Amino acid sequence: MTVVTPLAQRLVRHPTTARLAGPVLVRRRPTAEVVVAQMGKVGSQAVVASLSQAGVRAAHVHFLDRASLRWADRVYRQNWNPRRLPWHVWEGRHAAARLRAGERLDIVTVAREPVGRNLSAFFQVADLQFGIDLGDFGTGAAGADLVRLRSAFLEEFDEHERPLRWFDDELKRSTGIDVYRHPFDRAKGYSIIGSDRARVLVLRTDRLDETFTPAVHEFLGRPDVGLVNRNDSAAKDTGELYEQVQHRLRLPATYLEQMYNSKYARHFWTPEELAQARAAWSEAWPEPRSGSSGARQAVAGAQA
């Protein structure tokens, strides 16, 4: 895992030194053995922590494509903090440069059921972008508050397409690997794809507990890498709120069709799994129903 010193933090956050210091600091640290590349909110923190604890140096990135990295730079500086470009962007730039230089990378990536992933990503920005105080839902997700949250999620949140496009926009453009041309081993819960530019391990969030150790053993030849539980108190509190909303939220059929009939969803999950998840989010269930959260979590994973 990347270790960023206090001096490095100051250098990459200061507007006059960031563009020079970031690339230098990334290059000077020990080269990552594995790049954990994913779309965000898919459980990758546990993957990175688990590799790090076993002594595997891992870079953690969201973007690998050069155009996406430029977009991320602009968005973070304009909308979040002009003095702070996240470390994952510097890591992404370095990984992209290694690929362009002809280095063959080992990449670990994770797929999460798209509705759960999108709702989790929405939770991360609900307060800052949409003025929604998630603390209001701590008493049981009152009806008016839930209506506002549902409206903001469906009509204002702009990341719904990200899970549907990420493997094409980032992995395929940067490595040439099209995951959709390689069958995903649903029985095993993971797949390994190789090319002359990269080796890619593809995992599913909801199967990490059972598949992570054997998958990393097969991918890296390391039988000693166990999955670390990243359930700190802040994440636990958010996760409890997320579960309350998840239990009550109902979504329109058009949205569920867009998500679950996508090539992304159909590639990684069986028709039976997708039908189960679709039913659990459906407006056909107007009131909370026993087992609905469990049905969603069967493919989505429980973490926010």
Image (tube, grey):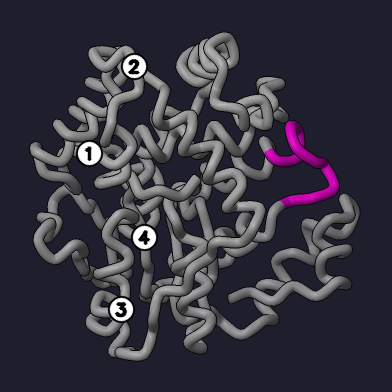
Q: Earlier in the sequence, mark 1 or mark 2?
A: 1
Residue labelled with disc 4 = 109
On the image, the x and y values in percent for residue 59 come to 54, 70
Report, in whole angstroms, how far the alpha carbon at label 1 lies from the one at label 4: 15 Å
Residue found 41% across the figure and 22% down from its top: 249
Q: In the rendered structure, are the residues bearing label 1 and label 3 in contact, judged by CB atoms less than 8 Å apart? A: no
**Marks 1 and 2, Cα distance to the nearest angstrom?**
26 Å
Closer to the observer: label 3 or label 2? 2
Q: Is residue 127 above or below residue 225?
A: above
Which of the numbered marks, if any, corresponds to residue 213? 3
Say which of 5 and 153 sits in front.
Answer: 153
Pointer 2 residue: 287
| Image vertical order of residue 81 relative to residue 29, above or below | above
| Amino acid at pointer 1 | Ala
Q: Which image quadrant is residue 267 in?
A: top left
How far apart marks 4 and 2 lie (CA) works out to 36 Å
Nearer mark to the viewer, of 1 and 2: 2
